Structure formats: structure tokens, C-alpha cells
């Protein structure tokens, strides 16, 4: 059976930064990309807030460059999805991992960088029309709605960012905010309010997505007056937050009520020796590419020190 010194699960900024540091420390890291190679950044067009890119960079290009940088130092990147883990509770113990339900490998250390995935509203009409005009990624799919009218659900920075992105290509964007205020940062709120073709509806929720095969309209309900209204749209974008990808670690690693992995103090250590967590899988506060990269670096250093301490025993 193959044994890996440092296994990194996930290929976003956290995973690749961990790989760069681990590779330079001669840990010969292997990265499994997971379901979304490149992570959430591959669904972001413009990254303007990552240091070192004065003109900005698009997400997919940045992830390709991060992968190339990790590979330059000897990281092996594999396409594959970790489906099962059996983590050792012993210091110096070997962890076993199953990839794509078929291949079992052993790892001396594991860095979990599996990130988080978009949440949906859970309405039958929404689920039925996913792929037929309902999307959780405006930046991936907005292009298909050029010159059309669309709606977006959400009140945070992501929703505000996606609304302004859609406003550039769509004739009208209706933004549904469940409460009477937006959660987004002031800068993002100003951007939304200063964009002429975005209409923000407060205290408004989706009652039903209309259409048989594709989205044809939206029935909305005002949650204070219960009044229902319909608008014609061809696309509905959901931007209501994320769910950490931690299901396979349930029962083995400590997590909070929302499913985010709990790490020790300022470190990336989980409750099991030799298992570290970095990026959005353990950070619901900041959720930025730059903070994910920072914790990826920390995880690699923690893994290196852990392996070093075993040699001292």
C-alpha cells in the first residue's frame, strides 16, 4: 500500500499554499484536488484583494499559478476525491484514506483543506430547476444571461459582489434580502446602491421559482405583509452562505455546530495527532483567499514540526 508523508486534501489557496511549504520542507506532499479543483476561487472572476496583484487577477488563473508553484517544488497533484478516512488517535499513528471509493492509501500526516460549498434554499422548485436557470455561482453562469433579467438571493458580501457582477451583463438584477438590512460591508452596500439596474427588495423571500424546464419567473413573498408578487426572470442566483465540506470527518474530528473543524488555539492542529485543518473548512469568520493561504502555510509548518518531534522520540 502506498504511504505518503504529507497528504493534502483539497486544492484551493489553503491546500496549494500548504503544498508549497510542505514540498520545500521535503515532505513530498500529495494533493488530492477534490470535487472542485482549485476550490471556490475558480468561480470568482476578479480577485482584487490578494496582495501582490496590483492590477487584480482572475480566480482560475491564480489557482493555475498556485498549482504550478506547488509542483515546481515537487508536489504531486492528483485528480481525485477522498471518500472515506480512518484517522489514528495515536501520536505517530498512520492514517488511512480511501480515494474515489476504490484506492486506499496511508498517510503520516494529513492537511485538510476541503473548504466549503454553497448552500441552497431547499425549495422543490429551486432544486428542480438547478441547471435550468438556478445557480449558486453568478460568476460561473452569469454569462449565459447576458441582456436578460435575473434575481439574486442574499444579503452578504458575496451576494452584493455577485449582484454588481450580474448588473454589468444583465439588463436588470432584483436582489432579495430577507431582513430589513444588508449584512454586506459598507463598501459593498454602496456599490450595490450606486448601480442603477439593481433593485433591492428588503424583507423579501422566494416563495416559488416559476417555470417547467427553465426558469421563467419568480414568486416572492414579503415576510412582514405576506403580500406575494411575481416578476419575469430567466436566471436565479443563490448567495446565502456556505456549508463546510466535513461530512467524512464526522465522529472522528471535533467540529462546531455548523460543521467547521475546530483547531487548537492559533494552530491548525485538530483533536487528533498528525491531522491539521486549514482554510474555509475551519474558518467561518474571514473566509478570504489570503487568510486561507496563511493557514495553509501554518498547517504545513505544524505538520513538519509534528514529524520532526516523532524523530526525537
Image: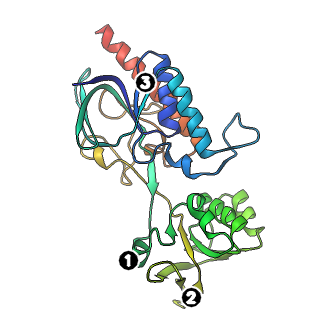
Q: Residues within 10 Å of mark 2 (few under 14, many from 20)?
A: some
Question: In the depicted view, which residue is nearer to us: 285 or 76?
Answer: 76
Q: Is residue 98 left or right of residue 159?
A: left
Question: In the depicted view, which residue is nearer to us: 95 or 80?
Answer: 80
Q: Is residue 176 visible?
A: no
| Badge 1 element | helix
Residue identifier under label 1:
124
Residue identifier under label 2:
230
| Badge 3 element | helix
Report the Cα–Cα distance between label 2 and label 3.
54 Å
Q: Quadrant of the C terminus?
A: top left
**Residue 9 in picture, x, y percent from top left:** 38, 37
Check the image and report above or below for 307 versus 238.
above
| Badge 2 element | strand
Report the Cα–Cα distance between label 1 and label 2.
18 Å
Residue identifier under label 3:
302
Amino acid at each position: 500500500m502506498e504511504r505518503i508523508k504529507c497528504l493534502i486534501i483539497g486544492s484551493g489557496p489553503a491546500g496549494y499554499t500548504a503544498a508549497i511549504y510542505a514540498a520545500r520542507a521535503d515532505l513530498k506532499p500529495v494533493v488530492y484536488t477534490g470535487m472542485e479543483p482549485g476550490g471556490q476561487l475558480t468561480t470568482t472572476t476578479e480577485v482584487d484583494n490578494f496582495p501582490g496583484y496590483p492590477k487584480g487577477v482572475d480566480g482560475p488563473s491564480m489557482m493555475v499559478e498556485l498549482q504550478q508553484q506547488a509542483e515546481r517544488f515537487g508536489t504531486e497533484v492528483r485528480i481525485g476525491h477522498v471518500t472515506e478516512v480512518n484517522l489514528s488517535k495515536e501520536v505517530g499513528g498512520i492514517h488511512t484514506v480511501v480515494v474515489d471509493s476504490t484506492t486506499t492509501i496511508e498517510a503520516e500526516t494529513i492537511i485538510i483543506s476541503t473548504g466549503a460549498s454553497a448552500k441552497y434554499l431547499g425549495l422543490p422548485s429551486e432544486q428542480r430547476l438547478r441547471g435550468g436557470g438556478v445557480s449558486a455561482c453568478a460568476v460561473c453562469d452569469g454569462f449565459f444571461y447576458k441582456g436578460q433579467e435575473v434575481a439574486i438571493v442574499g444579503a452578504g458580501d458575496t451576494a452584493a459582489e455577485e449582484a454588481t457582477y450580474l448588473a454589468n451583463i444583465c439588463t436588470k438584477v432584483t436582489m432579495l434580502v430577507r431582513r430589513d438590512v444588508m449584512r454586506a460591508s459598507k463598501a459593498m452596500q454602496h456599490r450595490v446602491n450606486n448601480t442603477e439596474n439593481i433593485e433591492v427588495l428588503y424583507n423579501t423571500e422566494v416563495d416559488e421559482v416559476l417555470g417547467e424546464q427553465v426558469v421563467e419567473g419568480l414568486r416572492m413573498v414579503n415576510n412582514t405583509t405576506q403580500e406575494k408578487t411575481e416578476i419575469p426572470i430567466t436566471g436565479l442566483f443563490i448567495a446565502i452562505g456556505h456549508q463546510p465540506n466535513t461530512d467524512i470527518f464526522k465522529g472522528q474530528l471535533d467540529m462546531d455546530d455548523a460543521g467547521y473543524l475546530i483547531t487548537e488555539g492559533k494552530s491548525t492542529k485538530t483533536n487528533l495527532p498528525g491531522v491539521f485543518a486549514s482554510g474555509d473548512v475551519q474558518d467561518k469568520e474571514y473566509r478570504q483567499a489570503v487568510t486561507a493561504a496563511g493557514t495553509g502555510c501554518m498547517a504545513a509548518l505544524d505538520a513538519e514540526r509534528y514529524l520532526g518531534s516523532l524523530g526525537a522520540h
